Amino acid sequence: MISTVIRLARVGSRSELAAAALMGLGYPSILAAALIPNLWLFAAAAAVTYATDWYLHQKSSYLVNRLGAVRLGLPIRFLLRELLLILLLAREGLADHPLFYAAAGCLLLFYGLQAAQGALATLVRLRRTMPVVTRNIDLHAVRVPDAPPRTLLHRSGEKMLHADVLMLAGLLTAVLSGRDVYGYAGVAGTLALGLLYILALAPYLRGRHRVPAAGAVLKAVTRWLGEYQPTVALYFSGGKDSAYQLNMWLETLEHLDGRPIIIMRERNLVERLHQTTVPVLCVPGGQHLMAMDLSTIRVTLYPANVGKNIHMLREPSMKHVFIGHGDSDKLASVNPYSKVYDEVWTAGRAGRDRYALAEVGVRDEDIVEVGRPQLAPIAADAPKHPVPTILYAPTWEGWDHKAGNTSLLLAGENIVRRLLDADRPVRVVYKPHPFTGLVNGKAKAVDARIRKMIAAASAARAADPRWAGQAAETAGQRSAARAELTRIEARLAELTDTGRPGSDEAETSRTSLADPHRLAEVRRLRAERADAHWRSLGWWEHTVVTGSAPSLYDCFNEADAMVSDISSVVSDFITSGKPYAVTDSAEVGAEEFKRQNTAVRAAVILSNSAAELDELLDAVADPAADRLAGARRELKRYLLGADRPTSQERFNAAVHALAAKAEARNARVARKLDGAEIAQLDGEADGVVEPPEATLDSVAEQGAGEAEPDAPAATGPSAVDPAAVEATDADPAIADAAAVAGATAEAAAPTTSAAAS
């Protein structure tokens, strides 16, 4: 019952629910105490409301934040308590007493001070807001002063409101003792504290505490862009929970040839960005972004299809590529929006075939297979523990509420129950999607029940004599691992917190220059953290993994097999070559499920009863019983491409080839603007202008020297593009890059016909 109330009230814990209930009772109690009147009840109820309000705000409770939407926000609650104090004084017979007038006057003056303080704090924040937020960009050309002390601006309105405690305490003491001096002292204290807060904020409006004007900052950014001359941009816009879509591409971008830059649009996402050596430029205003000189960028990469992409897509001097943030059979992987890009890059042949089947306007010649560079950390072998580890990683319910989106609603509890009760013991690692329950409260409730099941099973296993001996033998090792984990976490916090305590985004933009040595240590420690985490647990111990550490890929490496749903999680796990199962939650039937979803062709297909789990557990226990091992190898190549060249090499080659096309296009436009003949312009517009004969001859000779005698004519992404050929006039280095790209694409082109069919 309590858990249901917690879920409906949208509070995080029993303590939050208790605090909310006490606050709800506190205000009627204050009213009753004022009417009776009863000073002690009033004082006690007021203290309860102060304490519960403070606690719920410290917890950032959803419930207390929503009170503002129903006209019961924090200022209203404070005003209500103060008005009831005035009522109490009147009921005590002080309506004609000077102390009553002092209290009423204090209340009016105090709210005037609150208005001044609120306006001042807002103005200070606005004057500390730059038109951009940066990381790893040198802004020495503008003077960005240190931020005001955190105590002045953090939750400033709440702090100002609490100055009324002095007035309330003084007036109650005066009534109880009969000595008006306490009341006057409380009134004076409240007004003095409010005035002092305003005086403390005022100096930060002065010029030396303000950031430079928007024009000066943008001029400095323009100067830096001219010096750095970025060639490849990763462009991203999204909600606060979508930062993972960008973070997954950071290391790939760091290993690109050229000068990469990350362009973002939302300020609140910058702090969620992982540390990187790549320059980061967040430009919230579309007008500022469109006014920037980005003419040196030749290729822009887009991990997400969002409306703000239009502000970059309008740039004709660069080529635009959709790279996505995962490879799966979900409809998002064949979004019709993708046809606005010059190219769409997929992991393997499967992505190309999806677009062909969907017929959403993306042409086959505009698709390039580049693999998934970020899958490199996934290992092919699992730790050989006496008890195998099964990872259950369901996806979330999705925006459309379709039954097949997640196994959690209909099959989740069955899956976990069968794993926990398996004849041959296994360890269950449960990692739910971070969006679980976002749009469907039932999914959140199932998630809570599964966590409870796993906690109960873990406690029972700890008390079981079969495991107690193992626990005793490894107690010292696990304790040492926990101590190591604490040390690693502390060091990571020290390394990742590069700004001054209390600094704001303007100050951080000034100071956050990349330190490659620091970043290398951070990545080493993150790998060590994952290892220490697993060693701190018993290899027999069921566990729930949430948050960013251990990562999903860390869980892959710890698991012997996985159960999941249709999502990029499955496609990524296939890299490991380990057995996996996928739930047909919509119950379309195993054969139809495989026909609709490429990634499950080598999976054990589960119904909502999860009765088929024994086949997965048999494959884990005995490799000879793993009848799908060969199918998984073929499917891996089909989904993700060949192992050689590596994904990073293919990605680099694709960037170079597309940059060559951008250079060719820009050269054509430049010739048009130089006054070429009308016939030439018409021909070029139709794409039929012949490149210079010498250029064609040199490319033909190069191709003849490298091609196999009976090689078929190149098609698709490996074909010689006339634009790329024409670019050799502009820059010989680009011609070399295009040749490398073509050779790489040819090497990656063959795929198993069995998998493709």
Image: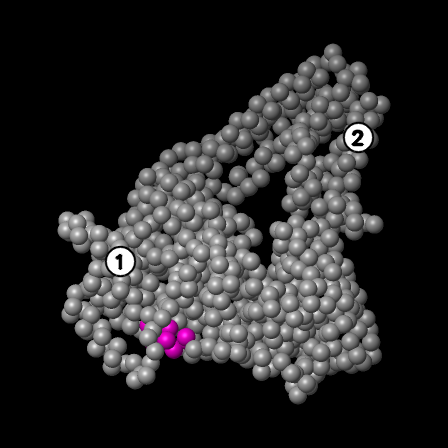
First reached walking from the N terminus: tag 2 or tag 1: 2
Q: Does residue 632 appear anywhere in the picture? A: yes
Look at the numbered discs 2 and 1 and tell me whether their residues touch, using CB distance below 8 Å. no
Helix, strand or loop under label 1? loop
What residue is shown with label 1? 687
Residue 584 magenta-drawn?
no
Bounds of the magenta segment: 742-749
Task: Find residue 578 and report its horizontal and vertical position in percent.
Answer: 61, 78
Q: Looking at the magenta stretch, what is its main secondary structure? A: helix
Q: Which mark is residue 724?
A: none
Which residue is farthest top? 96
Q: Residue at x 33, y 75 (%)?
A: 713
Q: Amino acid at mark 2?
A: Pro
Task: Find residue 642 and report its horizontal and vertical position in percent.
Answer: 46, 77
Helix, strand or loop under label 2? helix
Q: Residue at x 72, y 28 (%)?
A: 81
Question: How is this picture coloured?
Answer: one colour
Which one is in front, 199 or 749?
Answer: 749
From this view, report whether residue 159 is shown above or below residue 254. above
Q: Does residue 487 appear anywhere in the picture? A: no
What residue is shown with label 2? 28
From this view, report whether residue 689 is shown above or below residue 347. above
Task: Find residue 345 and report its horizontal and vertical position in percent.
Answer: 43, 64
Which one is in front, 553 or 301?
Answer: 301
Q: Residue at x 42, y 64 (%)?
A: 364
- Residue 620 horizontal side relative to residue 464, left or right: left
Crowd around label 2: few <14 · some 14–19 · many ≥20 (10 Å): few
Q: Amino acid at mark 1?
A: Gly
Q: Residue at x 75, y 41 (%)?
A: 20
